[in-house]
Amino acid sequence: MKSEDFELFSTLVKQRSGLILTADKAYLLESRLFPVARKHNIKSLEDMAQVLRARREETLMFDITEAMTTNESFFFRDQKPFTLFQKTLLPKLLAARVDKKQIRIWSAAASSGQEAYSLAMVCVEEAVKLQDWRVEIIGTDISREMVNRAKSGIYSQFEVQRGLPVTHLVKYFQQISGDKWQIKDSIRQMVQFREGNLLTDFSAAGPFDIVLCRNVLIYFDLPTKAHVLGSIAGVMQPDGFLLLGGAETVLGISDKFKIVSGEHGLYVKAESSYEAVA
Amino acid sequence: MKTCLIVDDSRVIRKVARQILEALGFACDEAENGQAALDVSKAKLPDFVLLDWNMPVMNGLEYLNAMRKMPGGSKPVVVFCTTENDINHIQEALGSGANEYIMKPFDADIIRGKLEQLGLI
């Protein structure tokens, strides 16, 4: 791919999604954009760049961004955040929200929905404690295709084996064909999925008690990370919790949050009085 | 070092599984059917068994039932790894004392994930 074409595609993707594509990702760009070119009856990526230069066609720009921002996900990814949610965060919120009996959770950049559904499964496991409580789990993703996949709750045999205990597969899924499994309605009804762009659109707006924004910031440059963290802080309860991915941090990026000592990946707002704060 | 017994009538599957499990730090032994696995288990019970279902001589479920009745037989962690991918087989396996279930085809990520869940790695 010509460097000026790579520049054109990567600038477009960054403007619309925040995703940074460095030159070493040229192979990824090519492999994901060929199907987009085919869909639009364009012969090559070079021709697609020409089309973009000639006319800023919205559907083409949408499809290019969509193709570059679909990332994989799996159930109970990294396991630890879900144990933390079940053993620490839920009990804290059950005590703190005893008057309202309401907990709101946001799975930001929800991809195909596995994170949000994993949280819902944990809530069902804790159903006795959550009786009479209203738990709202909202998943947002920039990709329409991913949001539709998440809403369907249908996963391949391969996907339901990554991270999901087989006892959960038996309990919370139904087999709809040989290698396709669908989350049962009782779990699907606990989660709402919507399109949402982390750079501009906080219409899923809070206030949220827990925000999970894991393995997303790693794809952004520093100013974009700071912007996104600031926006998340704006829709979080003062005593809410933020979960980031293992390779992500707020340190040196945003003063809106502070680290919770001993709990890797867990952050609270700067003004929070959470006692385990370093 | 934890020990693992790979039970499958396919030499290719045993070889692939061995590569994955050795990379995860297991000392591996192999058996090509349930009876051979039972003979190995009688000599020394492994920590972990990766178990095919359909095999000649003795199938995986028969091996599991026999092994669980042996002294100390409740201890090994057993993960079925089979082409049987319907919910009835999964439930039957769990009901017979399997700890986890993998539907073929599998890859290293799936095996590693299951072993992490089971606390073996």
Image (cartoon, coloured by chain):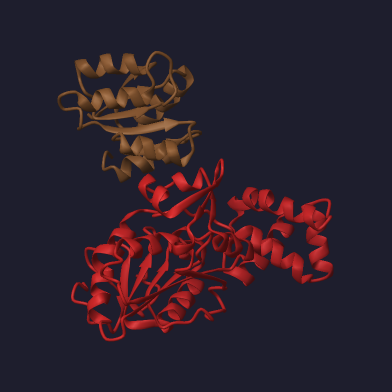
Q: Residue furthest bottom?
A: A99
When asked about the image quadrant of residue A195, the answer is bottom right
**Residue A1 at what x, y percent from top left?**
73, 50
Colour chosen for chain B: brown
Name the residue located 74 percent from the left edge and 58 percent from the top edge: A5
B56 vs A187: above or below: above
Q: Is residue B111 visible?
A: no
Q: Quadrant of the C terminus of chain A?
A: bottom left
Q: What residue is shown at x 79% (from left), y 54% (from top)?
A: A46
In the image as oriented, which residue stretches furthest toward the left? B71
In x, y percent, where is residue A60?
76, 65
Q: Quadrant of residue A66?
A: bottom right
Q: Is residue A150 left or right of residue B56?
A: right
Q: Is residue A99 left or right of residue A29?
A: left
* Position of residue A6 measured from the top left corner of the image (x, y, whole percent): 69, 57
The relative height of residue A192 versus residue A72 in the rendered view (above or below) is below
Rendered colour, chain A? red
Tell me where residue A117 appears, x and y as whole percent. Answer: 44, 61
Q: Residue at x 83, y 70 (%)?
A: A55
Q: Nearer the viewer, residue A128 or B22?
A: A128
Report whether B97 appears left or right of B103. Answer: left
Say if residue A97 shows up in the picture.
Answer: yes
